[in-house]
Image (cartoon, grey):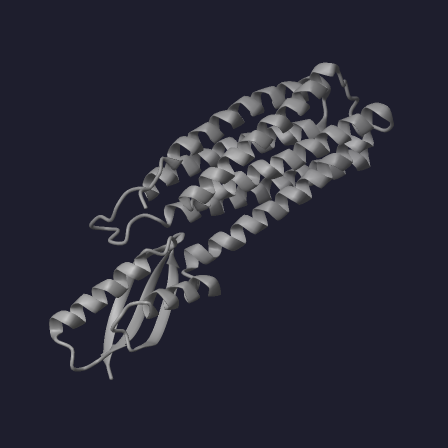
Amino acid sequence: MKKKDTGHAGLIAFLINVFLFIIKLAAGLISGSLAIFSDAFNSFLDILSYFLAFLSIKIAQKGPDKDHPFGHRRAEPLAAFMVAIFAGVLAFEILKTAIANILVGEPALILTPLVFGIVIVSIVVKLAAYFYLKQKADSNLSSTLEAIAIDSRNDVFASSIVLLGVVGAYLSNPIMDDVAAIFIAFYIFYSGYSIARKNIDYLMGARPTTETMNKIKQSVKSIKGVKDLSGVRAHYVGDRVHAEVSIVLDKKLTPKKTHDIGEKVQKEVEKIELVSRAFIHIDYE
């Protein structure tokens, strides 16, 4: 399958977050709200993270070269892992500031219709970005775009909590703003943890899912002339899979026929969307 222009989607996500950072920062300066400031800093870290993601997508699209004979697919999970690190740092800083405000005292808030409007706009924009990026991630099997889509979904949740927090602060108690910031911190931390857990497997060369392993076995057994499947090993190379397959053939086959069957098995396994390379070992009855 031809690689689509995922770099274009990454650039759009980057520009969206530049816009959101500017308007959220303005709202934070106007209102003095920690929750809104936290949301603005979240967008700023997204800008840094998405910039890395944009570069990694471009790098991952490069084919094999002398120093990277199996391509550059590890660039994408590496960038996604860095997104997770940024999320953890942000969560810690928000939590620390919110707790300090609760203990020492919440600064006076100035909540205007403009402030509420900016928060609502950020929710709508991020929701649209999530659906767009999720579709692009699914169609291109891009772990980086998937991480960005998850982050956009989390931003919808975070901005919704911000809205509840500032509404609560406006109607009842300013401490609601800090409570909202604490909820944001914990959710961002969980998001970063989820992204990191998945991409560590990509970087460490973990075994793919049982479903993928079964697809490999079924594709091999579908090839005429394969007597048995004596072994299958597979691991991630970046966010794609390399498979090592051992097949059993009839020892009476000619060398050419043996080669042809092995080549058919390789091509059939590599038709599986996640599998980028298949290595075939041939045994005989």
Q: Is 240 left, or right, of 167 in this rendering?
A: left
Q: Residue at x 79, y 29 (%)?
A: 106
Q: Is 154 left, or right, of 249 in this rendering?
A: right
* Quarter of the figure with the C terminus: bottom left
Q: Is residue 97 left or right of residue 126?
A: right
What residue do we see at 62% from left, 27% from top?
124
Res 118 visible: yes
Residue lying farthest to the right in this orientation: 172
Residue sitting at the far bottom: 285
Q: Residue at x 33, y 67 (%)?
A: 222
Residue 80, image x, y percentages: 47, 45
Q: Is residue 209 visible?
A: no
Q: In terms of depth relative to the viewer, which is nearer, 194 or 103? A: 194
Q: Is residue 40 above or below residue 93?
A: above
Identify the residue at horizontal 85%, vertical 29% (top origin): 173
Vertical relation: 184 (above or below) 265: above
* Residue with the most extreme front position: 224
Depth check: give the residue in front, 55 or 88.
55
Left or right of 165? Residue 217 is: left
Where residue 78 sits: x, y (%)? 42, 47
Query: Is residue 45 depicted above or below 285 in this figure?
Result: above
